[in-house]
Image (cartoon, rainbow, N blue to C red):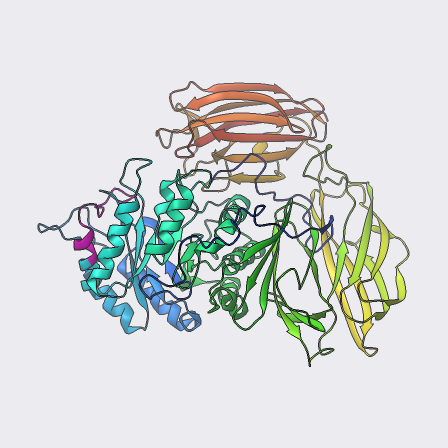
Amino acid sequence: MRRTRRFMTSLGVLATAVSLAAFTQVAPASAAAANIPSGHNGGGGSSSYNGLALTPPMGFNDWYQYRCGITEDIMLETARSLVSNGLAKLGYNYVNLDDCWMATTRSSDGELQADPTRFPHGIKWLADQIHAMGLKLGIYESIGTVTCQKLPGSYGHYQQDADTFASWGIDLLKFDYCGVASGTDPSADYEEMSQALLATGRPIVYSGEAPIAAHNANPSDPKYLPLISLSSKISNMWRVAPDLTTDFNATVFGHLQEDLPLADYAHPGAWNDLDMLAIGNPKFDWTVAEQQVQMSIWAELASPLLVSTDLTNMSAATKQILSNKDVIAVDQDRLGEQGRLITQDGPVSIVSKPLANGDVAVLLVNTSSAAQQVTTTASAAGLPHAAAYAVRDLWAHTTRESAGVIATTVPPEGATLYRVSPLHGQVGWYPPLTDLATTPDVPPAYPGSQFQITQPGQTITVPTVFRNDGRQAVTHASLSLSAPSGWKVSGTPARAGAVPGGGRLSGSFQVTVPPGTAAGSYTLTGGARYRWSGIHTGGETSQASLQVTVPPTGTPYLDQLTWLSQASSFHDVLIDKSYFGGPLTIHGTVYPHGLWANSIATIYYHLGANCSRFTTDLGLDDSVMGTGAVDYQFFADGKKIYDSGVVTNSTPTVYADVDVSGAHILELYVAEGNGTIQYGNADFGNPQLTCSG
């Protein structure tokens, strides 16, 4: 994933759950703006090359959950869980092995063979067991001489391996791009395996990764689109982006941006693959809301839904997300259209996906750290004129009626997925489409900062805006605001006898944070009450989070403070230990205080202009003496104040002593030092501030 320094997850900033930070009315994007050639069909045709995967495949892949710890017992337990928890009935019917299933060598006659310890009964036996449950078995190989984990690859054995897979009863092949020289054109090899699978006579879904050859699926690489086009003709699904990382913002929204221009290459039997669903996977540690966003984006873009988590021990939230029939129906719609960008303005994207019955799935995305009120129209989404429209929220499972405007407040780094239907004889059956935005007016920590910081004793203004997008007026409307116990709220509740369709009602409140309030996140709740059709009561609530912080005092180490936000490739930033579990160690020196991060990483701290000095030792952790290289950079209120230059395992420990006087926000950034994030295990040893008080 190519990421800029500013495209990082923001955790702990002003995170308004349902609030308005800016009203965004954006114009429909042109084909050129969306990077889609007008009328271009990608050369992919409109049929499946082998008659398979007419809807995006759904199921399980072991990689992000189990990696090389996968066993036949885990595969069987997972398959049984798919059946027993009802996911199989919803379409999750592929149980896919990734790398590490095979033995370290081929047999004497060149045949692939299963790892005898972890798969003692062999793959054919496993396939028979899974088929007996009504499910399908997928398997993994790679285009080169070895797989990504240095096990036997398929190069030179394409037809032999295809025949082996068919004889075992394999139903899907994931064909990776490993074991070849970087930059090697894989076109002929991927096509050869495509034909080899056809020659077996067994129906095997073909999942390719040819676009990875374009500098790890980099859209700016001139080979990227030709490899996408080829894939759409010779395979059923193909990866369009690098592997997932734990950085939600860069991974989920980054994959969205890379896939949006590729809609013309997708059709029944041929799908752009955004990689696996990380829903429920503890290694990713995404919130429920973030996991719903991933599911929404994957469904809107008609991506395969292959989850990589422990399905034998799902939480209720994980099961609820994966079992959402309304969202699955969008992904599996038989029309086979991928969602297309119709609007984009800054952090806001609006995507429209036509459905077979004439409905449209509308995805409203907000990648910023502040809530955005986003609006479009049924017409812009591709729907015909109608007296009114039913707007169904596919996560809230509520249906509202709109006169034609489709609008809502999308939370920070969030998304809303609607299914919109023209109404004719049912006009007036549903409550009106309304929205309430509650927006604390908190100034940025410094001009241009993404962080809005509130301190004890501060009084802030909190505007609230109610809008009615229904056909008819709502009556007896009123607005209110509540705050945590002990906080002072002043202001007259706004009231209106009627708010017409397309109209608004605004209010403004003053909220005082009590002196002595502890640092943390606090919730303000806005409320709107009204009547519709004269007799029915209706309402909206919206919550806004205030981040209250207290500047550090004395000489604290950073592991003793709470960061404003953090993001790191592969894994979240860790405190006082390395990714591999041991203490932070640089060239043999063990640090009792510190941070571990994998490039690319960003960590933000609030200093509140109360600190003067920051010191730390810097270097790659001793746990993995690889070929990694990083570049440490520090920023005070957005201005670079330090750059270590390239640091490798052979670089002597770097000592940084930096003046941070007057800075409100300290940003620690770990960049790639050699063009790759591999082995970029960056330590901050004894990072310490000198502050007043």
Relative to residue 458, is residue 168 depicted above or below? below
Residue in the image at 72% along x and 39% along y: 453
- In terms of depth relative to the viewer, which is nearer, 185 or 570? 185
Residue in the image at 80% along x and 60% along y: 466
Pinpoint residue 331: horizontal percent, then vertical percent.
49, 64
Examine the structure image and report whether residue 152 is included in the region drawn in magenta: yes
- In terms of depth relative to the viewer, which is nearer, 183 or 297? 183
Examine the structure image and report whether residue 492 is included in the region drawn in magenta: no
Asked if residue 74 lies left or right of residue 418, the reply is left
Asked if residue 386 lies left or right of residue 30, the reply is right
- Total marks drawn? 0
- Where are the magenta residues, as a range? 147-162
The image quarter in which residue 352 lies: bottom right
Pinpoint residue 227: horizontal percent, then vertical percent.
37, 46
Pinpoint residue 507: horizontal percent, then vertical percent.
86, 55
> Farthest residue toward the front?
39
> Farthest residue toward the left?
108
Q: Main secondary structure of the magenta part?
A: loop
Asked if residue 564 lies left or right of residue 322, the reply is right
Residue in the image at 31% along x and 44% along y: 177
- Visible in this render: residue 309? no
Q: Quadrant of the C terminus?
A: top right
Relative to residue 557, is residue 196 depicted above or below? below
Pinpoint residue 70: horizontal percent, then vertical percent.
30, 54
- Visible in this render: residue 165? yes
- In terms of depth relative to the viewer, which is nearer, 168 or 84? 168
